[in-house]
Image: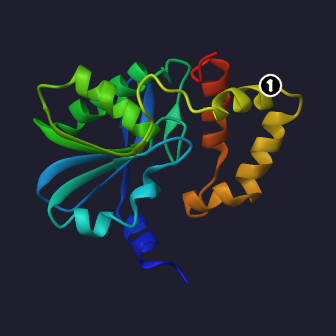
Amino acid sequence: MIETATRFYFDMPMQKVDTGTARLACRRYGSGSPLLLVHGFPLSGFTWRKVLPELSKRHTCYVPDLPGMGESEWTDKTDFSFPGQAQTLKTLVDRLGLEHYRVLAQDTGGTFARYLALADGARLRKLVLINTEVPHHRPPWIPLYQRLISLPGALAGFHLLLRFGPLRKDLGGKPVQLRLQFFQNFHHRGALGS
């Protein structure tokens, strides 16, 4: 039995928006003031499914999948740095034709949203961050993740975890290959820091 929130999320048609460096899957819900919902890593717009029915009563909710997550695509030109992700989101907002907007962001998406606020402060009216990182604080498990991913076979193990493990639930049964591609690129470009 498909959960009502899951059905609500997937019943909305998805459009692909070309930002020049990525093709973002984006869904639009409701009507009212524009609200951009930014998910964290390694998640997708599906993260917002349980709050969308209420938010869409008062806002036009734009729910993108960030590059390499969910149903979005990335290219060799995709910049996975925090400022790069913010620029991708700013280009998305430009392509959507939003004169002004609000942002609700969680997890790593909160960091992307803070950079977006710096890059597009004239149009961004409100910024709400939930369950996000603290600036200039690196969670203690990041160095452990960096060491683990450099071990032989780690990417193959991560791939199996995404394919068959609990992380698959977030995608509502959608393919996980793009998420793996994002993770590999995220690691190889050093976005996790040293």
Q: How is the image coloured?
A: rainbow
Vertical side of 34 occupied by 22: above or below: above
Q: Quadrant of residue 164?
A: bottom right
The kind of residue tagged 1 is: Ser
Q: Can residue 19 be seen in this snapshot?
A: no
Left or right, 32 with respect to 17, comes to left
Q: Residues within 10 Å of mark 1 (few under 14, many from 20)?
A: few
- Left or right of residue 126, residue 108 in this image: right
**Residue ranking furthest to the bottom:** 1
Q: What residue occupies the far right of the structure in this picture? A: 152
Viewer-nearest residue: 149 or 101:
149
Q: How many marks?
A: 1
Residue at horizontal 52 percent and vertical 48 percent from the top = 43
Q: Above or below — where is 35 with respect to 149?
A: below
Quarter of the image for the N terminus: give it: bottom right
Tell me what residue is drawn at x 20 percent, y 24 percent: 120
Q: Residue at position x 34%, y 44% from top? A: 105
Q: Name the quarter where the C terminus is drawn.
A: top right
Q: Where is residue 173 drawn, in percent x and y?
A: 61, 63
Residue 144: name its quadrant. top right
Q: Residue 34 at x, y = what percent?
A: 16, 48
Residue located beneath label 1 in the image: 150
Relative vertical location of residue 84 with respect to residue 129 in this rendering, above or below = above
Picture coordinates of residue 29, whole percent (x, y): 26, 60
Q: Residue at x 79, y 31 (%)?
A: 148
- Can the viewer see residue 40? yes
Give residue 168's position: percent from left, percent from top.
65, 57
What secondary structure is marked by label 1?
Answer: loop
